[in-house]
Amino acid sequence: MIMITMFITLEGPDGSGKTSHVKPLPNGWKAGQRVHTAGEPGGTAISEQIRTVLHDLKNTEMHPHTETLLYQAARAQIVEQVLLKLADGWIVFV
């Protein structure tokens, strides 16, 4: 059996339609192929909470270092919970 592993990212500025385009992508793969989609920051329960903090317009006093560390924390969580699925033959869309 051949194991297919792919990591596909859609890049673009906020509001460019990345989320709209990634949603239908898993439908194009053959039955039985393990496919996972995730947004970033986000993609896990913890990363989604971090995303909420980052995108909350009330957080005007957030220091740039804090913002950077929060993005890194969200990335660490998605790596541990989602991207390591690549080793098991998943196709991951972010």
Image (tube, helix red, strand yellow):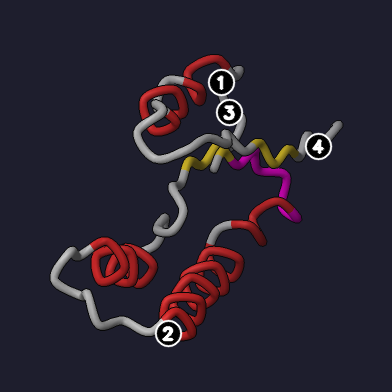
The stretch in magenta equals 87-92
Q: Is residue 66 above or below residue 19?
A: below
Q: Position of residue 22 (x, y in %)?
A: 46, 28
Q: Position of residue 21 (x, y in %)?
A: 44, 22
Please state if 11 lies on the left or on the right of 41 as rendered: right
Circles 4, 2 touching at the beta carbon (< 8 Å): no
Residue at horizontal 31%, vertical 68%? 54
Disc ID at residue 32 = 3
Mark 1 belongs to which amino acid?
Ala
Q: Earlier in the sequence, mark 3 or mark 4?
A: 4
Q: Classify residue 3 by image quadrant.
A: top right
Residue at horizontal 69%, vertical 41%? 7
Circles 1, 3 touching at the beta carbon (< 8 Å): yes
Q: Give the CA separation, mark 4 to mark 2.
A: 40 Å
Q: Position of residue 49 (x, y in %)?
A: 27, 70
Mark 3 belongs to which amino acid?
Gly
Q: Residues within 10 Å of mark 3 (few under 14, many from 20)?
A: few
Q: Earlier in the sequence, mark 4 or mark 2?
A: 4
Q: Earlier in the sequence, mark 1 or mark 4?
A: 4
For mark 2, what is the residue? Answer: 66
Circles 1, 4 touching at the beta carbon (< 8 Å): no
Mark 4 belongs to which amino acid?
Met
Q: Give the CA separation, mark 1 to mark 3.
A: 4 Å
For mark 4, what is the residue? Answer: 3
Q: Is residue 3 magenta?
A: no
